[in-house]
Amino acid sequence: MYDDDSFDPTRNQSIARLFELMRRVNSPNDTHDVLGEVARGVLELGFGAVALSEVDGNEMVVTYCEGPPALAEAILGDRDPVDLMLELMENGEHWGILRFVRHDLVPTWMRDGSIWTPDIEVSDDPMAWHPEDMLLAPLYSATGELLGTMGFDLPPGGRLPDEDLRELLELYVVQAGLALSNARQRDELAERVRLGETVKAVAMTASLIGLDSTLDESAEVMTHGFSALQTWIRCFPEGEAGPSEHVAGYPVPNEPGGGIQGLRRDLSRTAWPSGRPVQLSVDQKACPELPESQLVLQARMREHGVTHVVAAPIGVGQEMLGLLVMARLAEPGRFNERELSAVADIARELGRIVLNARLYERESRLVAELQELDRYKSELIATISHELKTPLTSIIGHVELLDEVELGATSVKAIARNAQRLDRLITNLLNYSSLQEKRAHVRRQVDLEQLCRNSVELLAFQAESAGISCTLATTGSPVLVSGDPDELGRIIDNLVGNAVKYSRRHGRVEVQAAYEGDTAVVTVSDTGLGISQVDQSHLFSAFHRSSNPDALSLPGTGLGLAISRRIAELHGGDITVESEFGVGSTFSLRLPRQARLSSVS
């Protein structure tokens, strides 16, 4: 050790440089510049050469060196297995954190490699530096992760470094390790942010209209986010009746019907159960995950000058819906673990997007089929009704002529009665068919109370003949809505007519129109047969008839309430029912009152 009272300019200069390095290592400076300062500091200690290697996967690659001109050409970019480098240093002499490997212990694999040997004479002095001696130092992070190594050659005076020199050298090694550790942390943080933004951007593509647009945007996002040369996405067809496959590619579009032979089967057997993407290098000897597709895929990689690809299955739950492939050049090279994890996240997210798109397409197809069936039903009703209407009109006309002759035949009356019944049925069918296509009505001011009065007066004779009391509870003021008076009158006529028809002798029917807040309400109450809970669930369906035998004994088409509710809905309202079997029913027609409806219009 140096005496405290001695003065060594070289040592003091090195210590000053170390203090400056400590400041720069902990500031956001360029790592390459900081490592250059470390290397120059080592050279100022008298060493003729210094090199730095960094861990890259399972290899140690030389990334920086200072020394003779031939040094960089000989070793820069060289790669050695990490495990062999660790074994080499473990077998050397331990000088603190330094590892000295004498020339006679240098392994054959390193001698046969591209090791740089300085042009110096070999001396018999045991303290002299031999051309093949090696002085190394492992570089670790604060968490104990191996980051790389530093190597030193041509020590001052051509002799083995003494204890004082080693002490200074160790300080530079520590600073180099800190610089690499800080750089690694910054790179990891930046990479996490980049990958997180990429995954988020892919998830956001779900808001685009159409699966093809989503996949196209996702392919572009992934190519940029992973610094890839090309991205391909392929989603498999949904069964035999489903739509054809969806494909996307960026920057070169993907073509339907293409793909790598056997890749789908390989991924479904290996990567899909584990949920882990498969990575393949162009010169990789064996890839157990891709037994069928490896050679085909590597041949395609050579065609495009690609060195690395990653393939991942797209799916969700138990179903594999597609696959994605990303290709890279030698730089940036292999996909690291964080990138592979992000690829897996994206594949799962795309699986969710594809599944939702399939469900939407399936639902759209079903809706289109239902709309077509509904259109066909309406056309069928209209066609049959028109075809029946013409001969029925003729029959009714001739029956009236026969009736005028006063033949008195009972059959003539039966013909007339049933012809009129068929005429009512066909009229209801035509009304129902036209309402299914109707979307708007002519609107004007309508007084619901007046419509109720008209219905009660219209059905007064029928109610009196059946021994039923039919009354209108009036409020004394108009109950105004905006709508079509003929169609709203048809609803009230139907509700009052049903109440009279299904009431027993000595029964009561009460009709009222009034306001309830912003709603105009017409209520028709009766003390008739009542409706069971089972029948109430289908009451407003077309062609529904009650399961009550007493109700079935009365003629009806099963269309009146369906037509009434459709008219109410077209007016922004609804019809509801409250009923107890054997006691009676109350039907309520609710419509927006005129002021509110007009303001909306």
Image (cartoon, helix red, strand yellow):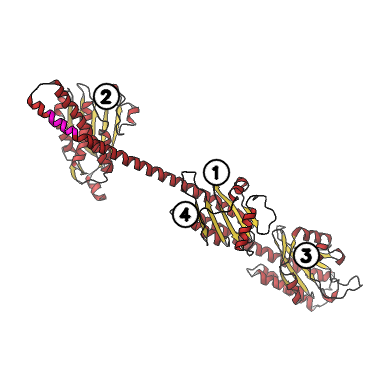
Say what secondary structure mark 2 lies in: helix
Q: Nearer the viewer, residue 268 or 23?
A: 268
Distance between mark 2 and mark 3 Cα atoms: 100 Å
Mark sitting on residue 137: 3
Who comes first in sequence, dot 2 or dot 4?
Answer: 4
Q: Percent position (x, y) of residue 565?
A: 27, 37
Secondary structure, mark 3, is strand
Q: Could you tell me how far apart the alpha carbons at marks 2 and 4 are, in whole angstroms?
A: 56 Å
In the image, 264 versus 186, the foreground residue is 264
Residue 447 visible? The answer is no
Kindly tell me whether residue 363 is visible in this rendering. Answer: yes
Q: Which mark is residue 410?
A: none
Question: Which of label 3 and label 4 is nearer to you?
Answer: 4
Q: Earlier in the sequence, mark 1 or mark 4?
A: 4
- Residue 397 is one of the magenta-drawn residues: yes
The residue pinned by badge 2 equals 551
Where does label 1 land, which residue? 317
Q: Secondary structure at mark 1?
A: loop
Please tell me which of labels 1 and 2 falls first in the chain: 1
Q: Please report contact status of discs 2 and 4: CB closer than 8 Å, yes or no.
A: no
**Residue at 54 percent of width and 47 percent of height:** 315
Residue 208: which quarter of the image?
A: bottom left
Q: Is residue 336 left or right of residue 123?
A: left
590 in relation to 207, above or below: above
Q: Categorize mark 1 by other alpha carbons within 10 Å: few (<14), some (14-19), many (20+).
A: few
**Image position, residue 293 (x, y; %):** 62, 52
Q: Please give the label number shown on residue 212.
A: 4
Residue type of the residue flagged with mark 4 = Asp
